[in-house]
Image (cartoon, coloured by chain):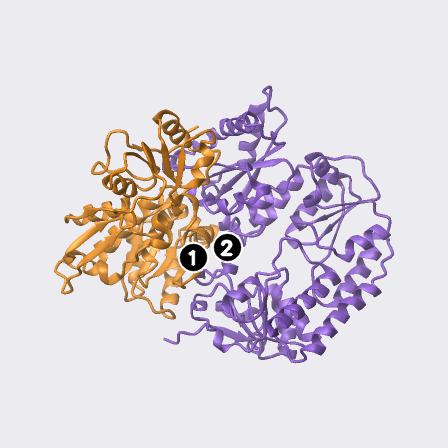
Chain colours: A purple, B orange
């Protein structure tokens, strides 16, 4: 037995072609290794903005997790964060519930008890109760929309009339299906919006659950006369959130929000434009040109582009032969980031990421510029044997990359707030520069 | 309402208990889930995961795998992993998914063993029971598979149930060698509820004691005390002279139970015990204090990882 982690070079993958991506790099073909990236990726509730935190991004909401105890266990990590105190509640399923489905009948009373508890203990009564259900109900085929409607009806005529009840599906089983949990939860959230009069100078940025970092996108929109730029994370109240329905158009910054944007287009008559987070300044520039054209606004990005290019040049001048290892537990598409870095003139030794077929295009281009870049799959069982000694990198990006390369300077780059556009490139380059200088010191 | 938690988060489930027992045994551990349960185990309930890598894998089930009962696919994935990873045996650990689809663990064992030439140990857990039940099932499955009737190696002492979920960083791991030779051990110690179950299953004499609290009464415990932890922790403190009642969210064996002791399940039961018991001291994980904010007595923080996740 080799006791080595399996990898393929970019050149090897290109030779095999898109249809021949090795099983070792694909999801669903093997047992799944428990690396930091797969723990976050596999579990829709585990880390970052999984279904649980995402559901609670609706202002003035609480969540009732109706599931076996195991599904809510790690929520104590989140519950300890001040913004989630008194916002998670649990209705634990028992073995008889599994057989009889009686847990569903208990939901209306459980909601009433939670609301009464909050009121009696002097807490604010929420406007929305999110019901989070898990794999068991996926398999039982529970009609959760109906259960939620019934729960809302049960509040009618009582002191909590008007509180909305919505489902959140934490179905890890469906994560590669047509509507994975993180797609569905976004649809649920924005389904709370109701039609209202349009404001030509209002725009929503949807996709994230924490605000965008100090990106130039906001500045461009303001300069173009957009008065209200709304993100769910900046809405303080439920009423403020409801005003997102007045937007003239949506800017979608995460493909997982595309289905929600489609719904909003259909139900609220809000069209959308999709922008992708990339680390190539030329592509960022092209995207802004497209946005300007579609939205009928002027965008002059020369200053910000120059700043980002300068940050790249500064790092390149200081470390001309800098070699990276890139993980997928980061605010980037690992393959796109790796290709952008190679195009900037840096080297990428290793990538730790699952190679979905839609990312083949990046590997294909990478193979031409950096054929020896090694691609590992975070999920693959032999990652158990990954050895740091084989890597030539001087810096790593991504929380998972730190796990594999603990002795190399690391930029986790997985903060809740999302980097975007030139700001993302500039700040990443500066962070890498600082980390390397700190390591030298 | 029964089953409703308004203050506490759920306690460590049986699959975490099972994985915790298996973690140090050199097994290839396969949690039969879609990924979330493994995330809970490795990312939360297994403090050793951050220090030492162990071969804990998710089966990576998808909806159609579960609906169609694709055990053959699971067996093939395990075979593929065994060809590339050194392991003494394969353990398959249940979750709510196999519980829902009614997986036949005996059949699954046979199916996998037909593909590989190492033992397969199925542990029946379903995510709805508590960690001590999972630990018990893991011990039983290991004993059934590996314990030799007449071992050559005589161990002086084997401690069962001293797992991280009960004792945090003070845990004592057992090895596959310990299990193989367990019937020949000169002394068996049950350090927690699951240890009692395992020892009873073996049918041998054993001592019920927590090695951490034996003759070691935590500072601050005075007067009439309510100990809320694993039953063996409570018994050990009582044996050391503490005037206490035991409350436990886990299991309370008849061999431990005395008047005033109670197995509790709901938050309200703990609240009622504190309200009505007239205790000078509560010795329990500090997170339980949120249940009784009005309690004015003495509180000694007796950490319990299975309750709070604190080591």
| Left or right: A437 in relation to B261 | right
Residue B262 versus residue A253 in the image, above or below: above
Chain of the residue under label 1: B
Chain of the residue under label 2: A
**Residue A90, label in figure:** none
The spot of residue B281 in percent (x, y) is 36, 34
Choose between B167 and A110: the one closer to the eye.
Answer: B167
Q: Secondary structure at mark 2?
A: helix
Choose between A356 and A166: the one closer to the eye.
Answer: A166
Please tell me which residue is depicted at 36% across the width and 24% down the height of the picture.
B276
The spot of residue B50 in percent (x, y) is 44, 60
| Residue A345 seen in the current view | no
| Left or right: A303 in relation to A133 | right
* Residue A325 figure quarter: bottom right
Q: Secondary structure at mark 1?
A: strand
Which residue was labeled with disc 2?
A: A42
* Residue A237 figure quarter: top right
């Amino acid at each position: 037995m080799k006791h080595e982690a399996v990898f393929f070079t970019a050149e090897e993958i290109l030779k095999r072609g898109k249809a021949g991506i090795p099983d070792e790099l694909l999801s669903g073909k093997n047992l799944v290794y428990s690396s930091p990236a797969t723990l976050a990726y596999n579990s829709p509730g585990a880390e970052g903005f999984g279904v649980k935190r995402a559901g609670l991004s609706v202002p003035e909401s609480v969540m009732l997790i109706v599931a076996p105890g195991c599904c809510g266990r790690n929520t104590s990590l989140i519950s300890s964060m001040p913004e989630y105190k008194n916002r998670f509640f649990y209705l634990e399923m028992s073995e008889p519930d599994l057989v009889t489905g009686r847990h569903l009948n208990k939901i209306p009373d459980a909601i009433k008890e939670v609301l009464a508890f909050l009121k009696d203990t002097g807490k604010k009564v929420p406007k929305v109760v999110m019901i989070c259900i898990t794999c068991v109900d996926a398999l039982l085929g529970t009609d959760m929309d109906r259960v939620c409607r019934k729960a809302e009806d049960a509040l009618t005529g009582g002191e909590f009339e008007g509180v909305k009840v919505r489902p959140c599906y934490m179905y890890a089983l469906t994560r590669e299906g047509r509507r994975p949990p993180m797609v569905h939860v976004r649809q649920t959230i924005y389904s709370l919006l109701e039609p209202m009069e349009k404001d030509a100078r209002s725009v929503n940025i949807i996709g994230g659950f924490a605000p965008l970092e100090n990106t130039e996108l906001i500045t461009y929109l303001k300069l173009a006369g957009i008065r209200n730029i709304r993100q769910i994370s900046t809405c303080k109240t439920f009423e403020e959130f409801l005003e997102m329905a007045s937007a003239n158009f949506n800017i979608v910054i995460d493909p997982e929000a595309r289905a929600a944007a489609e719904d909003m287009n259909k139900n609220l008559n809000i069209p959308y434009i999709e922008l992708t987070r990339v680390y190539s300044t030329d592509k960022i520039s092209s995207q802004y040109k497209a946005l300007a054209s579609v939205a009928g606004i002027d965008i002059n990005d020369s200053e910000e582009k120059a700043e980002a290019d300068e940050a790249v040049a500064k790092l390149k001048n200081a470390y001309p032969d800098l070699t990276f290892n890139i993980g997928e537990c980061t605010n980037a598409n690992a393959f796109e980031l790796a290709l952008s870095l190679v195009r900037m003139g840096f080297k990428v030794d290793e990538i730790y990421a699952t190679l979905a077929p839609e990312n083949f295009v990046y590997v294909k281009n990478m193979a031409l510029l950096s054929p020896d870049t090694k691609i590992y799959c975070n999920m693959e069982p032999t990652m158990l044997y990954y050895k740091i000694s084989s890597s030539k990198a001087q810096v790593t990006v991504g929380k998972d990359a730190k796990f594999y390369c603990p002795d190399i300077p690391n930029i986790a780059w997985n903060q809740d707030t999302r980097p975007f556009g030139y700001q993302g490139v500039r700040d990443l380059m500066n962070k890498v520069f600082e980390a390397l200088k700190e390591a030298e010191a | 309402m029964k089953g409703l938690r308004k203050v506490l988060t759920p306690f460590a489930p049986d699959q975490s208990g099972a994985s915790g027992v298996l973690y140090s045994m050199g097994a290839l551990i396969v949690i039969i889930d879609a990924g979330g349960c493994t995330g809970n185990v490795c990312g939360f309930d297994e403090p050793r995961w951050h220090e030492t890598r162990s071969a804990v894998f998710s089966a990576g089930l998808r909806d159609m795998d579960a609906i169609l009962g694709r055990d053959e696919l699971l067996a093939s994935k395990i075979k593929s992993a065994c060809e590339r990873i050194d392991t003494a045996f394969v353990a398959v650990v249940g979750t709510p998914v196999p519980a829902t689809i009614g997986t036949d663990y005996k059949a699954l064992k046979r199916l996998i063993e037909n593909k590989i030439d190492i033992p397969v140990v199925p542990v029946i857990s379903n995510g709805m029971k508590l960690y001590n039940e999972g630990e018990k099932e893991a011990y039983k499955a290991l004993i059934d598979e590996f314990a030799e009737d007449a071992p050559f190696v005589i161990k002086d002492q084997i401690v069962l149930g001293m797992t991280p979920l009960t004792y945090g960083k003070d845990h004592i791991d057992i090895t596959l060698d310990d299990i193989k030779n367990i019937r020949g051990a000169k002394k068996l110690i049950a350090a927690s509820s699951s240890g009692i179950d395992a020892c009873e299953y073996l049918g041998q004499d054993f001592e019920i004691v927590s090695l951490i609290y034996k003759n070691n009464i935590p500072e601050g415990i005075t007067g009439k005390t309510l100990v809320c932890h694993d039953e063996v922790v409570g018994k050990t403190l009582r044996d050391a002279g503490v005037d206490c009642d035991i409350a436990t969210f886990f299991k309370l064996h008849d061999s431990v139970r005395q008047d005033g002791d109670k197995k509790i399940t709901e938050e309200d039961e703990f609240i009622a015990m504190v309200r009505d018991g007239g205790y000078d001291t509560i010795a329990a994980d500090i997170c339980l204090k949120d249940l009784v904010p009005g309690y004015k007595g003495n509180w000694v923080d007796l950490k319990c990882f299975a309750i709070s996740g604190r080591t």
